[in-house]
Image: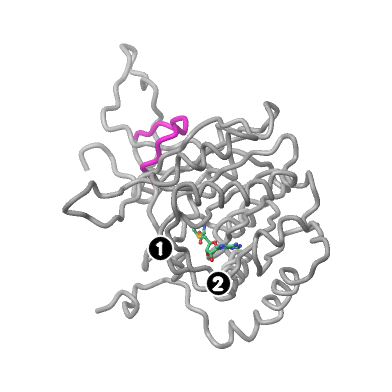
Amino acid sequence: MPAGSSSRNRSLSLSAEDRRRLAPELERARALGASGSCIALPEAAGEVILGDALDALPRIRPASIDLLVADPPYNMDKDFGEARGARMSDEGYEEYTRAWVEAALPLLKPEASVYVCCDWRCSSAVQRVLSRTLIVRNRITWEREKGRASSRNWKSAHEDIWFATASDRYRFDAKSVRLRRQVRAPYRDVGGAPKGWDDGPDGPFRDTAASNLWTDLTVPFWSMSENTNHPTQKPEKLLAKLILASSRPGDLVLDPFLGSGTSAVVAKKLGRRYLAIEIDAEHCLAALRRLELATAGARIQGYEDGVFWERNSSPRRACRPGD
Ligand SMILES: C[S@@+](CC[C@H](N)C(=O)[O-])C[C@H]1O[C@@H](n2cnc3c(N)ncnc32)[C@H](O)[C@@H]1O
């Protein structure tokens, strides 16, 4: 049975009624993308812009953005609908990255943080471009569970996210992104007290500092309600870590390559404002529908009780040692 017809398939699908209801919002997004005038900053919630990031970025007020999260097309052949990514030379990709980063730079506040997603192939180009104008602080590597095996190469099982800031005055809330790990060997001291762990209803656990190696993410698939048919959708949990660590409630998050809407949806769920640009109308529509759904439900899979949980664990599913 194809995944799409399973009764457990929770992927987003847009009904005719959804399309009719969201048509005015899509038109608003299109008008924002088409007009040559300045794009007003959102007072509350946010704004989705249907258009080309390189046209829209110069129309956003300078020094207005607290956090830039960008997941641009990687340097590979990929069909995004309106934007058909074709593999470029490494130099060509670096030039492409330089163009959009330079357009985004004037929009950053002096305290702003920047995250840029990439894969192994374009990671060095992204680092070089960012380090020319920003302070590069780290590279996060996250494990993708999925990946195509090859008989002539190592299967690609990770992606990178470069972290940079505009100055040394930046926000980083390490406490908000702790990872809750099950403790499989819950040692006690001579007095019988837990050594570095807590006992909870779901068994012994330890809240650990988030490192730059993430192995707790699941790429959205058909049984997750956040899943859409976007070909390179990021997990909400990934965006939640970036947004919680590097912004405050009410801050303005910019995403020049919105895709299916993940950054804006997570910003909304976490009480941040967003400005988000996407060139393809179908992806834009999916984002608008997800934003509509986020009004009713702010849950982020894998983030509960103010902590991130290991992959395939949650307050209900965490098992006790010996289970
Ligand atoms: C890697 S995807 C982003 C996926 C997104 N993070 C998500 O979770 O769905 C890149 C997106 O950028 C869009 N895009 C490509 N070129 C663009 C441009 N010049 N301006 C705006 N969007 C663009 C593509 O249509 C694609 O949806």
Q: Residue 213 lies in magenta, yes or no? A: yes
Which residue does the image show at 47% across and 35% down from the upper left?
Answer: 139
Q: Nearer the viewer, residue 56 or 304?
A: 56
Element under disc 1: loop
Identify which amino acid the numbered label 2 is placed on.
Ala
The answer to whether 22 is drawn above or below residue 48 in the figure is below
Which residue does the image show at 63% across and 86% down from the upper left?
Answer: 20
Mark 2 crowdedness (10 Å alpha carbons): few <14, some 14-19, many ≥20: many
Q: Does mark 1 have its CB less than 8 Å from ligand 1? A: no
Residue 37 placement (x, y as % from top left): 83, 65
Identify which amino acid the numbered label 1 is placed on.
Asp
Residue 126 placement (x, y as % from top left): 51, 42
Residue at mark 2: 286
The answer to whether 41 is drawn above or below residue 180 in the figure is below
Residue at mark 1: 77
Which residues are drawn in magenta?
Answer: 204-216
Q: Nearer the viewer, residue 144 or 172?
A: 144
User: Which corner quadrant holds the C terminus?
Assistant: top left
For ligand 1, the image quadrant comes to bottom right
The answer to whether 35 is drawn above or below residue 321 in the figure is below
User: Exactly how many numbered labels are in the figure?
Assistant: 2
Determine the CA span between mark 2 and mark 1: 22 Å
Q: Is residue 306 left or right of residue 252?
A: left
Q: Residue furthest top?
A: 190
Residue 249 placement (x, y as % from top left): 70, 46
